[in-house]
Amino acid sequence: MNQTIKLLIITSILAASIFSQTTDKKAVVVTALTMPADAAAGGEITGNIKDGQIIPLRWAESSQVACFPGTRFEMFNGNQVFYRVTLPAASSMVITLTPKDNAQVNLYALRQGNRPTEQPVPPNVERATSCEASYPIYANMGGGKVVKNKDTGIRKVEYISVNSSYSILIGVAGAKGLTEGEFKLNISIKPR
């Protein structure tokens, strides 16, 4: 009996500690997007990463997510904002991110299931059906030399579906600690 009371007290203390830690942090907000009737024409929104927050990135390099490697965390370590859209069955989706005033913002998208239990938001993602990321490609050659590919600043990821629909979680992230930057997000969906 005493062990049960001790366990209950310890559990209560731990729960209070966890509650105070989670309430001190700003909740991650996901904006649900509804596509227009003619989704092939594309839906377009504007946003700013100042409306988001910086989140831990270790989830992204997990082999069960495989979104982007730890060696590229600097491309996503600024504020992040999130959007969710449905990819219907037998469709293709193209997501294009265009920064305003050359803001250093990058794009990733997680393909997740349709049930709410299959739709965690970073940093609480432990697995994803797939993840695609778009950011500047470069290589560190050593001795301070960096080789960069030509970069227009426009980011794009694509998905297709066959027999099932999916929930697509879109993340827009500032690079190199950027906490403010405007962008335009275009999403087009076409039947396959």
Image (tube, rainbow, N blue to C red):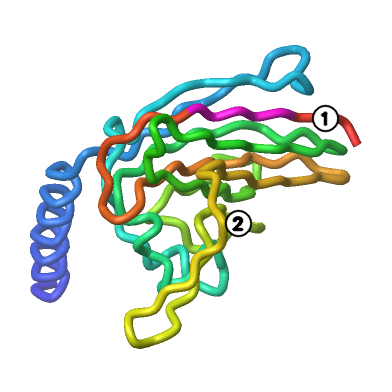
In the image, residue 91 sits, relative to residue 68, either above or below, namely above
In the image, residue 146 sits, relative to residue 157, either above or below, namely below
Q: Is residue 98 magenta?
A: no
Q: Residue at x 30, y 37 (%)?
A: 52
Secondary structure of the residue carrying numbered label 1: strand
Nearer to me, 3 or 171? 171
Q: Which residue is mark 2?
A: 131
| Residue density around tag 2, few if under 14, some if 14–19, many if 20 or more, within 10 Å | many
Q: Which residue is mark 1?
A: 190
Q: Residue at x 64, y 37 (%)?
A: 95
| Residue density around tag 1, few if under 14, some if 14–19, many if 20 or more, within 10 Å | some
In the image, residue 169 sits, relative to residue 177, either above or below, namely above
Q: Residue at x 42, y 67 (%)?
A: 72
Image label count: 2
Q: Main secondary structure of the magenta part?
A: strand
In the figure, is residue 133 to the left or right of 102?
A: right
Quarter assignment of residue 191 = top right
Secondary structure of the residue carrying numbered label 2: strand
Nearer to me, 147 or 12? 147
Q: Amino acid at mark 1?
A: Lys
In magenta, the rendered stretch is 184-188
Quadrant in which the C terminus is drawn:
top right
Quarter assignment of residue 165 = top right
Nearer to me, 41 or 38? 41
